[in-house]
Image (cartoon, coloured by chain):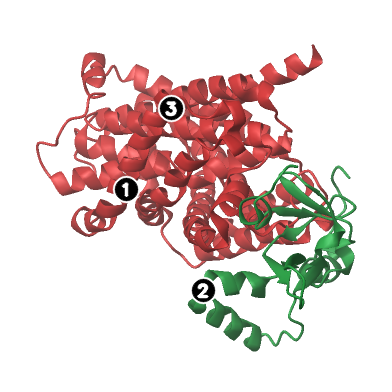
Chain colours: A green, B red
């Protein structure tokens, strides 16, 4: 059996969705605790708020202030079940569609409201 | 066979990048200051900066070719988000300052060519640079700026025609202490190192290795081009220093404008020299503008795991393409506001020098991690060089700000 270090190999790794698109990094990992059963890795968390928690209080407060100022409503955190993991190498591939993730909201919004309207937005190797 | 041709054409390209990519507003301004105030005595600092950059470029290229990840990727993955925040913020600040200075450099060249104020040129320059990034591919950015940058060879011709005492130049490659104005001497020394070793260069180089899909086959090519390219680039920086030492030092000229710096080529080469200076300043700063703007995008996208590649259409990586768009626009506006590009450059170079521990010391850890580098970890020579650079960077961190206060005037 081959072992993996959660913090060393999975935490902060690049995430790819089922189309092999980059969809953020493993910003946090949640263990599920159920009565009478051993803890197990249940969820991959992706999103700015998860990162802010890990960096520390001043950054958290500052980002919270920014979010209040620009009136962000959703928490922007994607919760990907660990069972969706297909492969862990130098990247972590998960069987989800990046388009459905809350943490990809800014990417989608920028594409739909800004980038798409600028000539040449679709020029490049696909 | 086809793979071999591609590999060696890449090596040739690395060489060209070294020649065309080494010089930009930072190295031109700091080498001129060094030559004008201390003759050729500071040539050894240019040599130290060049060797340092060659070592770091070789390592960031090897790191990417072996691990299939960029330096930024590994800074985040191996050190975690908490540590990563520090180099992220610091490199972002120094890169944006340098971006403003480079846009200022292109605009200054256009001002010298047309007589129209650089404040009018900043936005058109930014627009053309942005357009190239928006519509072009990585190859366009890399090769375009490298090939046109060859014009910088004019400085080598200029230095040759000025007939310097070559034995004196050779002797100046050995470190020496100043006879006068110690604070000013060491201040310029720090800014010369900051102008050679900029963190955006390793971010750009290791991202380029991934854009070009390098593998371990490229390790030797990468080494050769890092050494030769920087040798030529550093040689050109020393040529700038010699020109300044021969032309400006005897006159005790105060290097406070680009018209003064232009004399370094106009004196040996006449009217053509002035045009060569304008072309060199404009083209090399334009190349650096593209590379720094892309590096800002690479840094953010890789740090946070966004979709990134200069080869993808902007619609496929909206955050990546908006990062360089916003950076270029914002830094062009700084130039429109009337900041003096030369003053901004010298301050930026000192801040860059002070930032180096955050980007150099982690390299020491990564280059010796067998999980990342498998059989391609550093040998003892490379480690000795990297330890020396780490110590140097720590010294620069401590002395940069006091020297800015004592010798920056």
Residue B150 shown left or right of residue B271 in the figure = right
Choose top left, top right, bottom left or bottom right for residue A6.
bottom right
- Where residue B144 is drawn, which disc sits there? none
Q: Which residue is denoted by mark 1 in the rendering?
A: B394
Name the spot of residue B369 as percent of width and height, x first: 54, 38
Name the spot of residue B145 as percent of width and height, x first: 62, 35
Placement of the C terminus of chain B among the 4 image quadrants: bottom left
Foreground tag (1 vs 3): 3
- Where residue A56 is drawn, which disc sits there? 2
Q: Is residue B41 above or below residue A91?
A: above
Name the spot of residue B337 as percent of width and height, x first: 49, 68
Give the distance between the C-alpha atoms of the residues marked 2 and 3, in whole angstroms.
36 Å
Residue A27 shown left or right of residue B239 in the figure = right
What residue is drawn where x is 62% and y is 46%? B290
Give the distance between the C-alpha atoms of the residues marked 2 and 1, in whole angstroms.
26 Å
Label 1 in the same subunit as label 3 = yes
Q: Nearer the viewer, residue B274 or B193?
A: B193
Q: Which residue is denoted by mark 3 in the rendering?
A: B382
What residue is drawn where x is 49% and y is 78%? A58
Label 2 in the same subunit as label 1 = no
Name the spot of residue B341 as percent of width and height, x first: 43, 55
The chain letter under disc 2 is A
Q: Is residue B131 above or below residue B45?
A: below
Outermost residue toward the left in this view: B179
Outermost residue toward the front in this view: A36
Q: Nearer the viewer, residue B192 or B371?
A: B371
Placement of the N terminus of chain B among the 4 image quadrants: top right
Secondary-structure class at tag 1: helix
Secondary-structure class at tag 2: loop
Choose top left, top right, bottom left or bottom right for residue B161.
top left
The chain letter under disc 3 is B
Give the distance between the C-alpha atoms of the residues marked 1 and 3, in whole angstroms.
18 Å
């Amino acid at each position: 059996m081959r072992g993996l270090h959660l913090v060393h190999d999975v935490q902060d790794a690049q995430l790819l969705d089922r189309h092999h698109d980059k969809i953020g990094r493993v910003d946090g990992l949640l263990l599920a605790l159920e009565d009478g059963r051993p803890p197990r890795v249940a969820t991959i968390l992706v999103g700015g708020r998860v990162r802010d928690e890990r960096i520390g209080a001043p950054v958290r407060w500052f980002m919270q202030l920014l979010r209040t100022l620009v009136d962000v409503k959703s928490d922007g955190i994607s919760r990907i079940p660990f069972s969706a993991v297909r492969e862990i190498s130098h990247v972590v591939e998960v069987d989800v569609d990046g388009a459905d993730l809350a943490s990809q909201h800014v990417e989608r919004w920028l594409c739909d409201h800004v980038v798409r309207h600028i000539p040449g937005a679709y020029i490049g190797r696909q | 066979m086809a793979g071999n041709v591609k590999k060696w054409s890449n090596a040739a390209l690395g060489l060209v990048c070294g020649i065309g990519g080494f010089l930009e507003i930072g190295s031109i301004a700091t080498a001129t200051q060094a030559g004008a105030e201390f003759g050729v005595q500071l040539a050894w600092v240019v040599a130290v900066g060049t060797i340092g950059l060659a070592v770091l470029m070789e390592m960031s290229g090897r790191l990417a070719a072996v691990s299939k990840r960029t330096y930024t990727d590994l800074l985040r993955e191996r050190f975690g988000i908490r540590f990563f925040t520090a180099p992220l913020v610091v490199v972002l600040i120094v890169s944006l300052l340098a971006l403003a200075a480079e846009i200022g450099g292109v605009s200054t060249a256009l001002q010298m060519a047309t007589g129209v104020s650089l404040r009018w040129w900043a936005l058109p320059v930014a627009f053309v640079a942005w357009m190239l990034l928006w519509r072009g591919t990585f190859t366009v950015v890399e090769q375009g700026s490298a090939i046109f940058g060859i014009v910088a060879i004019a400085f080598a011709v200029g230095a040759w025609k000025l007939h310097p005492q070559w034995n004196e130049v050779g002797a100046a490659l050995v470190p020496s202490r100043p006879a006068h104005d110690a604070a000013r001497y060491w201040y310029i020394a720090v800014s010369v190192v900051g102008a050679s070793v900029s963190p955006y260069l390793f971010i750009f180089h290791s991202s380029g290795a991934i854009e070009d899909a390098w593998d371990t086959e490229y390790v030797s090519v990468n080494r050769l081009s890092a050494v030769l390219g920087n040798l030529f680039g550093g040689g050109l920086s020393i040529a700038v220093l010699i020109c300044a030492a021969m032309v400006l030092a005897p006159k005790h000229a105060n290097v406070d404008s680009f018209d003064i710096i232009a004399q370094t080529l106009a004196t040996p080469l006449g009217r053509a020299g002035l045009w060569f200076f304008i072309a060199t300043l404009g083209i090399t700063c334009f190349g650096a503008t593209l590379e720094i703007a892309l590096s800002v995008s690479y840094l953010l996208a890789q740090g946070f795991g966004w979709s990134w590649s200069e080869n993808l259409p902007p619609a496929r990586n909206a955050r990546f393409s908006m990062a360089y768009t916003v950076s270029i626009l914002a830094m062009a506006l700084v130039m429109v506001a009337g900041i003096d590009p030369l003053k901004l450059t010298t301050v930026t170079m000192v801040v860059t020098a002070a930032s180096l521990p955050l980007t150099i010391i982690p390299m020491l850890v990564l280059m010796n991690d067998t999980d990342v580098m498998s059989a391609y970890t550093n040998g003892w020579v490379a480690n000795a060089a990297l330890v020396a650079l780490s110590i140097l960077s720590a010294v620069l961190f401590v002395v940069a700000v006091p020297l800015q206060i004592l010798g920056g005037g």
